[in-house]
Image (cartoon, rainbow, N blue to C red):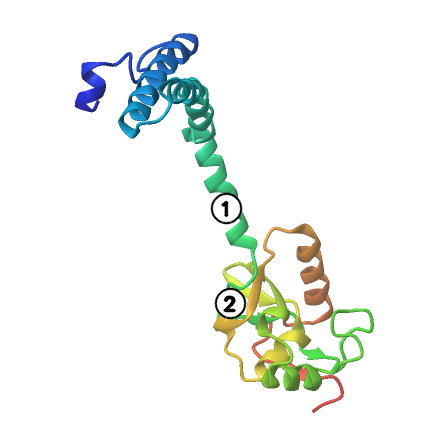
Amino acid sequence: MAPAMAAAPWTFSVGATLPGMVGRSTTAGATLGGADAAARGQDIARGALYGGIFGAALPATGRAVGALVSPARTTAAANAIADSAHTSAGGGVAADAKFAQKTYNPMFHPKGKFASMSVDNVAADLKSGTINPADVEINYIVRNGQTIILNTRSAQSLEAAGIPRSLWNGVNRTGNQLFEDLLNGQIGRNRGAPFDTVRRSGAQ
């Protein structure tokens, strides 16, 4: 405890109930407010009034802030932030990540983000800066220690544009049942998956 607080704990509302804290803090605030006004050559009564109001508000405010930053709340907030960071975008993709399928259609899905665009179109826009790498989301799952990419065409566009995997907008979907099912489907249709490389449909 600071020396001043130890010398006059009632002034600083230490160890008191909330009603007692309010009363003592009001008195202290009024005293300090009046003294300050006198020193400044201002209205002492008005200074005491404002000081008392301010002093009365401090104990309740202090308790509210204390509740908000309690260990339990702080831990919960930290865990929420950690969970968000784990699944948030922009974390890159492992250099040794593999693909869930061995071939891909050079045209993006007609109802997707890059509808009517080809892998080459997106790669060209990435090179020119028309498309930011952060706008090309790469979902992946870590299974048995191996990172497996789900967005084959998007990944190929980024590779064609010469963007290193460390700068990809990677999103870890491990444990998300929707994406786990998507991966199961891709692996089921592609014997021998996952693969180190992929090729375009129809290419040799």
Three-letter amino acid code at the position of disc 2: Gly
**Which residue is tagged 2?**
92
Give the number of the disc on residue 1.
none
Q: Residues within 10 Å of mark 2 (few under 14, many from 20)?
A: some
**Residue in the picture at 63% in, 67% down:** 137
Residue 131: image location, x then y, percent: 64, 77
* Secondary element at image label 1: helix
Q: Residues within 10 Å of mark 1 (few under 14, many from 20)?
A: few
**Residue in the picture at 30% in, 30% down:** 40
**Residue in the picture at 42% in, 12% down:** 18
Residue 23: image location, x then y, percent: 39, 10
Q: Is residue 63 left or right of residue 10?
A: right
- The quadrant of the image that shows the C terminus is bottom right
Residue extending farthest bottom:
204
Q: CA distance from mark 1 to mark 2?
A: 18 Å
* Secondary element at image label 2: loop
Q: From where the camera sits, is residue 73 visible? A: yes
Check the image and report above or below for 54 versus 134.
above
**Which residue is tagged 1?**
81
